[in-house]
Image (cartoon, rainbow, N blue to C red):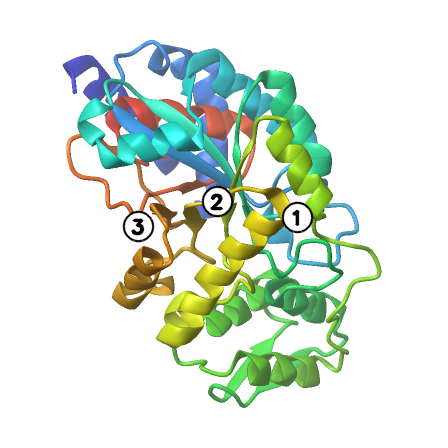
Amino acid sequence: MDTGSTVVTRMLNCLPLLFGSPGSKREKASAVAARLGLAWMLERLPRRPCLLVFNYHRIAEQGNNPYDPGLIEASPDQFDEQMRILKKHYALAELAEVQELVDHPERIRHCRVLVTLDDGYRDNHDVAFPILRSHGIKATFFLATGFVGTNRVPWWDQLAYLVRRTEKRTLRLHYPRELTCDIHERSRFAVLETLLSLYKCEKTPDPERFLCGVAEACGVTRPREASERLFMTWEDARSLVKGGMSIGSHTHDHELLAKLSREEQLHQCRLSREIIAREVGLEVDAMAYPVGSRSSFSDVTLGCLRETGYRTAFSYYGGVNASSKAIPRYDVNRISVGGASSRFRMRTAVAVVTARDLW
């Protein structure tokens, strides 16, 4: 890294220290950096050869959404602005090209950027797809095949619905351990984050029992099916492919693979490929791990991926894929997206100058 980029990056990393709570620091610092022209400056500095992968889940307005608000990472206007930034300033890549670069990181001569979307929500097709096409960006959509074309409500949205609808001031859980959550003292969002973490924890081996316990504690009936379809249809998926987008697997039921037996993991990996091949006519060889944390997949998972014919798998705990070292084919790093477009612009600019996710 040259001296100029080092000095600028250190200066930028000091900006958030001037602002309030941790949740607002980066947003406020990004707004100030934008007014000072620092994003413009960073976008003109030499860039490190790296692979930067952004991931979204839902593109929608928060509105009266009764489900998990944390999955709505951008409004339609924000997503449009973020895609405009990427198209104007960076070299966009498609999935096939990224897979080649993962196999041969020495071929990464400059920064390449890939856009991905997980889960297959209906708004991915209805909202994100037209915006991507308007900018000429070919994104990758990872589909949880067990939800496509159904009215199923996934476990994370069930938890959000229960917490947001309960009239109880205090939730008392008995599984996987005794726990009391005071909604009066904590925000509902904070309580939801606690419950989501508990669901994902390896110490919660029976997710169905956990969901039933949360529903009982909340005094609310679990929403196993929605009145309106939350996820895209197979016709929507075929439309994505015809429009130049790529499709990948997100397993069948979106359960954390590391918590399943080897046989169950093989089933999830194989079934999703078979269904996509039947419905879309594609032999997909890329997967995005459900949840995507380091603990959500294991060495057993990697063996299952090899056995079922996957070439690449994407994680979701952050990080930039640098060309200076080998990129694990079953652990390609992705960065989450959230907040205002000013932060998105700063985060991208800093990442490509430093080859690190610092903002």
Q: Is residue 12 visible?
A: no
> Of helix, strand and loop, which one carries label 3?
loop
Q: Is residue 240 left or right of residue 288?
A: right
Residue wearing tag 2: 283
Q: Residues within 10 Å of mark 1 (few under 14, many from 20)?
A: many
Quadrant in the picture for residue 214: bottom right
Viewer-side label of 3, 2: 2
* Marks 1 & 2, CB-CB < 8 Å contact: no
Q: Could you tell me residue 354's position as x and y percent?
A: 25, 27
Q: CA distance from mark 1 to mark 3?
A: 24 Å
Indicate the quadrant containing the N terminus: top left, top right, bottom left or bottom right.
top left
Q: Could you tell me residue 258's position as x and y percent?
A: 37, 69
The amino acid pointed to by label 2 is Glu
Q: At 64% from the left edge and 64% from the top edge, which residue is drawn?
A: 154
Q: CA distance from mark 1 to mark 2?
A: 21 Å
The amino acid pointed to by label 1 is Tyr
Residue wearing tag 3: 330
Image vertical order of residue 118 relative to residue 28, above or below: below
Q: At 79% from the left edge and 62% from the top edge, which residue is drawn?
A: 226
The amino acid pointed to by label 3 is Tyr
> Of helix, strand and loop, which one carries label 2?
loop
Image vertical order of residue 135 relative to residue 330, above or below: above
Q: Residues within 10 Å of mark 3 (few under 14, many from 20)?
A: many
Q: Residues within 10 Å of mark 2 (few under 14, many from 20)?
A: some
Residue wearing tag 1: 121
Q: Could you tell me residue 54's position as x and y percent?
A: 45, 36
> Of helix, strand and loop, which one carries label 1?
loop
Q: Is residue 66 left or right of residue 302?
A: right
Q: At 47% from the left edge and 45% from the top edge, which residue is drawn?
A: 284
